[in-house]
Image (cartoon, rainbow, N blue to C red):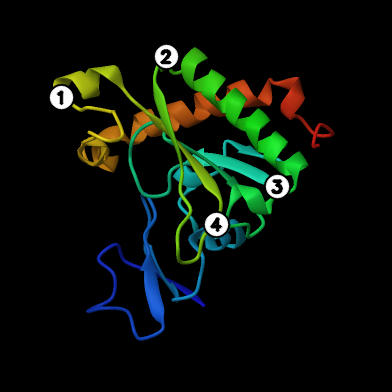
Amino acid sequence: MSEPMSKAGPAGPPPPGYRMLDFLGGASHLVEETTCRGCYMNSSEQRLPDILTPVFDDGMITVRQDAEWTVPGFMVVGVRPHIGALDEMGLPLVERIGRVTHFVRRAMRSCLGLSAVQMYQEEKLDRPHFHLWMLPLWPDVMAAHNINPRIYESNIARYLRLFSLDSHEPAIRHCAEQVRDYLAAIPELQAGTVL
């Protein structure tokens, strides 16, 4: 069950056995508590805001703007099947993820001018679905707000909150188009190259 709701959500907390999933630029969705965000996104793409349309999709791996944070160029490499961790995948898929991630990073450097990107692979304890965050470190924003990117001294959570959809939607869309166009021109990522 999924029921789109206004961004403000329902009056009060979700009913027992349910939770809300929020998505960048769109309504919140009431889903069963056991629903995995990654699986929901893959099975309900037509309900998601168009700003979350994948910039790459080979049927197994997707790349798209982060679903919640409004940092322009914040790409997430994910898998369509419900796989919780890297070690649960076969080596051909792991190698394919490496190849896709390699070219996404190249796009971020070549097209977006990013010399620094932080990558995180989060394994949730509850409802894990493999995804790799590729967080761009925009140097002007980092400097203006004295953001320290070192993971053990980081104030990167504050960095994430410096961006808003109202102010950054055009930049988010521009970055996505740039990455999409770059990846579409890479022969090693085209149909028939799946390992």
SS state under label 3? loop
- Label 3 amino acid? Met
Res. 146 mark: 1
SS state under label 4? loop
Q: Is residue 58 left or right of residue 123?
A: right
Q: Nearer the viewer, residue 39 or 121?
A: 121
Q: Residue at x 22, y 23 (%)?
A: 141
Instruction: Say which quarter of the image contains residue 143.
Output: top left
Q: Is residue 92 left or right of residue 116?
A: right
- Label 1 amino acid? Asn
Residue that badge 3 annotates: 60
Outermost residue on the right side: it is: 192
Instruction: Say which quarter of the image contains residue 61.
Output: top right
Give coordinates of residue 186: x percent, y percent.
Answer: 70, 21
Distance from the alpha carbon under mark 2 to that under mark 1: 20 Å
- Total count of labels: 4
Distance from the alpha carbon under mark 1 to that under mark 3: 39 Å
Q: Earlier in the sequence, mark 4 or mark 3?
A: 3
- Label 4 amino acid? His
SS state under label 1? loop
Residue that badge 2 annotates: 113
Q: Nearer the viewer, residue 93 or 162?
A: 93
Residue that badge 4 annotates: 129
